[in-house]
Image (tube, rainbow, N blue to C red):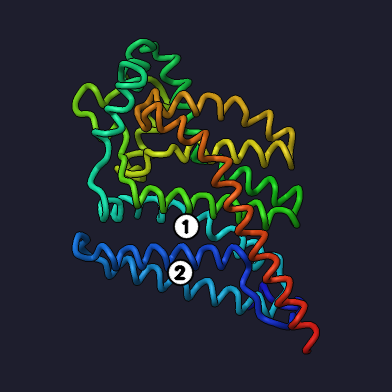
Amino acid sequence: MKLLNGIKKKNGYNLYPIDIATIIYILISAIYICIGSAKLENETPHFIIRLAILVFIFFIAFINDKYDNEILKFIRNFYPILLLSYFYGETAYMNNIIFNNLDPYFAHIEQLIFGCQVSIEFSKHFPQKWFNELMNFGYFSYYFLTIIVCFVVYLTNRTKSFKVIFIVATSFYIYYIIFSLFPVVGPQFYFKGALAKIPDAYFFRDAVKFVQKIGEVPTGAFPSSHVGMALIFLYFSFKYSIKLFYFILPLVVILCFATVYIKAHYFVDVIAGIISSPIIFSLSTLAYNKLEKIKTKNDNLLIKYQ
């Protein structure tokens, strides 16, 4: 406990809004796993992990209640960001409980609207290695946008960072619920053989292939959370760090094209990502405001009766 030496004690006990949002997601997904138990196997590890996360949340909240420490505050705000990768991968485990794979319908809609499979035609008409590398660079940059945007806001505006990180994490949770309910895996998993591949290029193509090999699973194509969350990142960077905004703007533009080019998404997924982004942002913001209002009211009552 050396890190806690000499720091100030606090009174009262509170869960942060981000704690409550994470607990709610854990409970909703656990209930969903129970509902789908007839179709699922090896549910036990998923419940054990959830229990471990819940224990961690309450433990860190208890410690932070006793010690007013910046390190503890940092951990409490950023731990959900570290959990996102696990929760995303888990949607592939849960996404065939109600519906079976919906890709035939989405591929058909793509064909009806555009007269072709845009992802296939895009890479076919732009096979140049430099263009391929540019698209993969844009897609690869997404893996760092979440941490970069949240961390920059944390450094530049500590007070507002609590709300920003809550909205980012909760928006991901909402997308994950959609992915679990509506299984769409995207062209790279739905199409077979040459139709699912794009030519090799240079470093970033290999980097994307490596990341997809270790972390990408057949899930989460509709709507495109890559596009939806990238737009939310743009908004926060514009609001809190204009330099960051101008830095990530070209990355986000390339990313929107890249998700289709590398066959991670149908073009209709991208459109749905653009449409869903402000809706999910609004829902997450509303949730934060409600929880923060409740927390403030409880804090005031706690002070009053101490």
Marker disc for residue 262: none
Q: Is residue 24 left or right of residue 99?
A: right
What residue did someone put label 2 on?
A: 53
Q: Amino acid at mark 1?
A: Leu
**Residue 174 visible in rendering:** yes
Residue 96 lies, in percent from the top left, at 25, 51
Q: Amino acid at mark 2?
A: Ile
Residue 52 lies, in percent from the top left, at 42, 72
Query: Mark 1 or 2 closer to N-term?
Result: 2
The image quadrant where one finds the C terminus is: bottom right
- Name the quadrant containing residue 15: bottom right
Examine the rendered structure and indicate whether residue 306 appears above or below residue 266.
Answer: below
Residue 189 lies, in percent from the top left, at 26, 35
Please give the name of the residue rendered at 60% of the width and 79% of the height, measured from the top-left corner. 62
Neighbor class of circle 1 (other Cα within 10 Å; few <14, some 14-19, many 20+) is: few
- Name the quadrant containing residue 120: top left
- Which of the pair 203/123 is nearer the observer? 123
Neighbor class of circle 2 (other Cα within 10 Å; few <14, some 14-19, many 20+) is: some
Q: Is residue 81 left or right of residue 1?
A: left
Examine the rendered structure and indicate whether residue 179 appears above or below residue 305.
Answer: above
Marker disc for residue 83: 1
Say whether marks 1 and 2 touch (CB < 8 Å).
yes
Outermost residue toward the front?
Answer: 112
The image quadrant where one finds the N terminus is: bottom right
Please give the name of the residue rendered at 31% of the width and 50% of the height, measured from the top-left corner. 92
